[in-house]
Image (cartoon, rainbow, N blue to C red):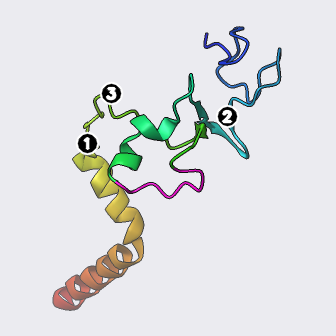
Amino acid sequence: MPECPKCRQPVETTAIACPHCRTTLKAFGHPGVPLYRAEGEAALCDTCVYHHDDSCNYPQRPHARECTLYTNQLRPLDNAIYRPSASSLVKRWLQQNLAWVILGAILLISVLLALRG
């Protein structure tokens, strides 16, 4: 079970605020987004990937003490690339082009009936 960064009491992973000290644990209005806090005197920006590659647009940059986008540059990034399976690609294609598939089937049946008669 995670602990509150301020009072170090255990809190539920779904908690938006600490039930003991009322410290905000998740981003305001986004309960699934974690809120990262700086420990000590250094700002989060000092060790953030987005600050060092100059792609951060956070208004408190470069002195942010709390941030939802923080990514520690010292930790390796997860380079796992999502690759959907062939069946999920076919299902998605059929969902997107269902009208064309139905129209093509009707056209094919019409041509077969015309050739038969």
Numbered label attached to residue 75 = 3
- Mark nearer the N terminus (1 vs 3): 3
Which amino acid type corresponds to the residue marked 3 in the rendered image?
A: Arg
Task: Please determine whether, in this image, residue 4 is positioned above or below residue 95.
Answer: above
Numbered label attached to residue 69 = none
Residue 57 part of the magenta segment: yes
The residue nearer to you, when weighing 110 against 13, is 13
Distance from Cα at disc 2 to Cα at disc 1: 27 Å
Q: Main secondary structure of the magenta part?
A: loop
Q: Are marks 2 and 1 in contact (CB under 8 Å)?
A: no
Which is in the foreground here, disc 1 or disc 3?
A: 3
The residue nearer to you, when weighing 13 against 87, is 13
**Residue 21: image location, x then y, percent:** 82, 18
What kind of element bears circle 1? loop
Q: In the rendered image, which quarter is residue 3 located in?
A: top right
**Crowd tier of the residue under label 1, counting other residues whose Cα lies within 10 Å: few below 14, some 14–19, many 20 or above:** few
**Residue 50: image location, x then y, percent:** 39, 48
Q: Which residues are magenta?
A: 54-61
Distance from Cα at disc 1 to Cα at disc 3: 18 Å
Which amino acid type corresponds to the residue marked 1 in the rendered image?
A: Ile
